[in-house]
Image (cartoon, rainbow, N blue to C red):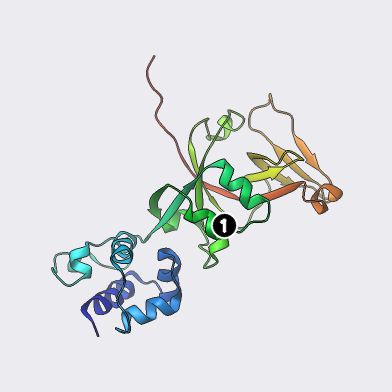
């Protein structure tokens, strides 16, 4: 077995994650991780960089060039991280029109790395991977989501009444973040935190006609600091 495969298996087991979970975090198949660990193939340089970030170790340790990280790797002591692509609203609109997010993610120009534990369920389906988007507007400031902040959305996480969600709605396919409420009569209500914005109600016919599409649950807000004045 190659040294990278040995180190990879060692780190993964100490962190208490499965091959499938690691594959999901890195964005490859479980078979690929198995091949890496069993010396059937070696990760490319870009994959090594991502593995080091995801597992919270140095590239040198992963490649067997140092033992400096050895004592720091204990279950629960290092949180695996996930790469979150930052999408613009044009790309999200494309996803809302029925196009898959696989190619859309690839067009993202920026990414951030965050602890996987922040996002609940991490799907192995590329179509349901977490992503980030920049907020436009003040309708959700009262919910701690101010204008120009960046939010992380998880399409795989289950949604309940009152959760903030990213949605596409209406004939013009508007994109917004709202609180969502599921009514007993089957209607869906979208509500802003700012009372200046009236609630939006979608009935069963609207839902059947795809007048509202729930993209995913807002899991995390990254606020940008304001400039002084």
Q: Residue at x 35, y 60 (%)?
A: 79
- Does any portion of residue 194 appear in the rendered image? yes
Q: Residue at x 70, y 50 (%)?
A: 213
Q: Is residue 150 above or below residue 119?
A: above
Residue 132: x, y in percent?
49, 47
Q: Secondary structure at mark 1?
A: helix
Residue 111: x, y in percent?
41, 49
From the viewer's perspective, is 154 left or right of 159? left
From the viewer's perspective, is 59 left or right of 80? left
- Quarter of the rendering containing residue 63: bottom left
From the viewer's perspective, is 169 left or right of 58? right
Q: Is residue 181 above or below residue 10?
A: above
Residue 2: x, y in percent?
23, 81
Q: Quadrant of the C terminus?
A: top left
Q: Quadrant of the N terminus?
A: bottom left
Would you name the residue on which mark 1 appears?
101
């Amino acid at each position: 077995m190659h040294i990278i495969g040995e180190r990879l298996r060692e780190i993964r087991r100490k962190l208490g994650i499965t091959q499938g979970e690691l594959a999901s975090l890195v964005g490859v198949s479980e078979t690929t991780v198995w091949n890496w660990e069993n010396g059937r193939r070696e990760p490319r340089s870009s994959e090594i960089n991502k593995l080091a970030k995801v597992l919270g170790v140095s590239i040198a340790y992963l490649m067997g060039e140092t033992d400096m990280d050895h004592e720091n790797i204990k279950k629960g002591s290092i949180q695996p991280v996930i790469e979150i692509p930052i999408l613009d609203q044009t790309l999200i609109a494309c996803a809302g029109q029925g196009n898959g997010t696989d190619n859309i993610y690839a067009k993202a120009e920026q990414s951030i790395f965050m602890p996987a534990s922040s996002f609940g369920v991490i799907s192995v389906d590329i179509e349901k991977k977490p992503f980030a988007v920049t907020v436009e507007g003040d309708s959700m400031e009262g919910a701690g989501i101010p204008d120009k902040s960046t939010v992380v959305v998880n399409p795989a996480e289950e949604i309940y009444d009152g959760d903030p969600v990213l949605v596409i709605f209406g004939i013009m396919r508007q994109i917004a973040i709202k609180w969502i409420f599921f009514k007993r009569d089957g209607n869906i209500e979208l509500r802003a935190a700012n009372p200046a914005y009236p609630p939006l109600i979608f009935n069963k016919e609207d839902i059947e006609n795809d007048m509202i599409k729930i993209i995913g649950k807002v899991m995390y807000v990254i606020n940008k600091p304001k400039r002084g004045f």
